[in-house]
Amino acid sequence: MNLLFLMTDQHRVDTLGCYGNPHVATPNLDRLAATGTRFDRCYTPTAICTPARASLLTGQAPFRHRLLANYERNVGYLEDLREDAFTFPGALAERGYQLGLVGKWHVGTHRNAASYGFDGPDLPGWHNPVDHPDYAAYLKERGLPPYRISDSVRGTTPNGNPGNLLAARLHQPVEATFEHYLATRAIEQLERYAADGRPFFLATHFFGPHLPYLLPDAYFDRYDPDLVDLPVSIAETFEGKPPVQRNYSAHWTFDTIPIEVTRKLIAVYWGYVTLIDEQIGRILTRLDELGLADDTSVFFTADHGEFTGAHRLHDKGPAMYEDIYRIPGIIRVPGEAPQVRQEFVSLTDCTATILDLAGCDTSPAVDSRSLVPLVRGEHPRWPAELLAEFHGHHFPYPQRMIRDERHKLIVNPESVNELYDLDTDPHELTNRYEHPELLPVRRRLMRRLYDLLRERGDNFYHWMTPMFDIGDLDYDPSLSSFEPEGTA
């Protein structure tokens, strides 16, 4: 079984037609979803690039693999995985797989993708490396113009300086964009693997639609801002929320940007999604032309989401909202019927799924569950809750989250905890942690989270022990052990 793994960065699930967006053109991903399994409740283990990608590589939660934050501004954290860490490409190589990765790496600074056996250009960093020699050679070979931008969109920071770049016009044709370059290199790799004949794993990791949104006019202006419904959570007041959220809003300069510019930014983000969908379409078309589709499982997902103005925020950060934790998750396995699944699944589950499809032992991916039974339409016992974690971005900030069918609890040791009723408050505007009518829910989820963290070996549960004193962790034998829940 060949494996084609398509991944984007900082991608909102609600920008895809197959996930309900009526305006954004994503025909290629919609077609993939229509012929495969779409997971409606797929989540990242942590909404930040390096830890999430390390979880995919290892099948381990961040607290276990210890790559806890992006390196750029967190030099106090580990920069690379331990040398003895299990990774899925090592297991695939033992099975004779050709291994390729074209695009964003961002899983360490001293060891790159080639260190783990992957073919492909070495493309480090958090955003399109437009000064990379392979990209420069690609442009020169085709007589295409170099990268150049104008019309930058920025807010103003509290100290009066220009804020981070959010978007700009890119003065290149689509064929010169970094996204087109990545798809071209992926197609070239696909052709080499097809000629070789051995099974392959080929990943294409796009750097977008991560901000800043740098697009040619045709995509920068593709969508009329009047089509954009602003996020309901743009009404965020931060009342009763951890103060870090208000501070982060100021850092990302949301309130200094006119609302019509916010609407335009979302429209530009949509254009970025369409550009990437078109490049994914080129890869999938070539897969068909090479006669590989019947022998290749195809994945599409993202490392995490993006705020695009939701909760008066941009980027991602220390706020565990659905906007950045829920991600797209699509898997097409030859011969399996199309379907939509409602189980809670994770990006980390892709690791065991890759191993399973390749005929490898899945047990070393200790925090990962193979999704193959779900793709086959089976109904195994499955956990009824989802866990996620965060350790900081720009500064240390530990958080843990548990969500079930209706409620979400977030523990913030340095601040106030959060509890949301996602049925009555799907946009997570009202923190109900102190509301007396939800005290039973709060205690149930607190106990469940505590027990699950202890079961996994996540020492964060030590942060929670003071909650015994306030009654949130009173001992209850019926809640003290982990029994996966689900349908038999």
Image (cartoon, grey):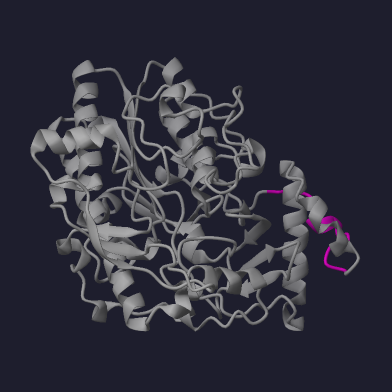
Name the quadrant containing residue 114.
top left
In screen coordinates, is 284 left or right of 363? left
In screen coordinates, is 263 left or right of 139? right
Q: Considering depth in this image, is 179 or 441 the residue closer to the camera?
A: 179
Q: Considering depth in this image, is 56 or 373 the residue closer to the camera?
A: 56
Q: Position of residue 351 (x, y in %)?
A: 49, 36
Residue drawn at the location 29% of the way across and 74% of the way down:
264
Task: Give the answer, above or below, for where 74 lies relative to 57.
Answer: below
Q: Considering depth in this image, is 120 or 442 the residue closer to the camera?
A: 120
- In this orientation, does residue 186 appear? no
Quarter holding the N terminus is: top left
Q: Position of residue 52 (x, y in %)?
A: 52, 45
Q: Which residue is the extreme one toward the front?
A: 160
Name the quadrant containing residue 82.
top right
- In this orientation, does residue 37 appear? yes
Q: Which residue is the extreme one toward the left?
A: 143
Q: Position of residue 71 (x, y in %)?
A: 54, 43
Task: Give the answer, above or below, for where 165 lies relative to 67.
Answer: below
Main SS of the magenta part reads loop
Residue drawn at the location 29% of the way across and 38% of the way down:
335
Name the quadrant containing residue 436.
bottom right
Q: Position of residue 476 (x, y in %)?
A: 86, 60
Q: Which residue is the extreme one toward the right?
A: 469
In screen coordinates, is 298 left or right of 183? right
Q: Is residue 441 magenta?
A: no
Q: Which residues are magenta?
A: 471-483
Q: Considering depth in this image, is 342 or 186 the residue closer to the camera?
A: 186
Task: Give the answer, above or below, for where 115 lies relative to 27.
Answer: above
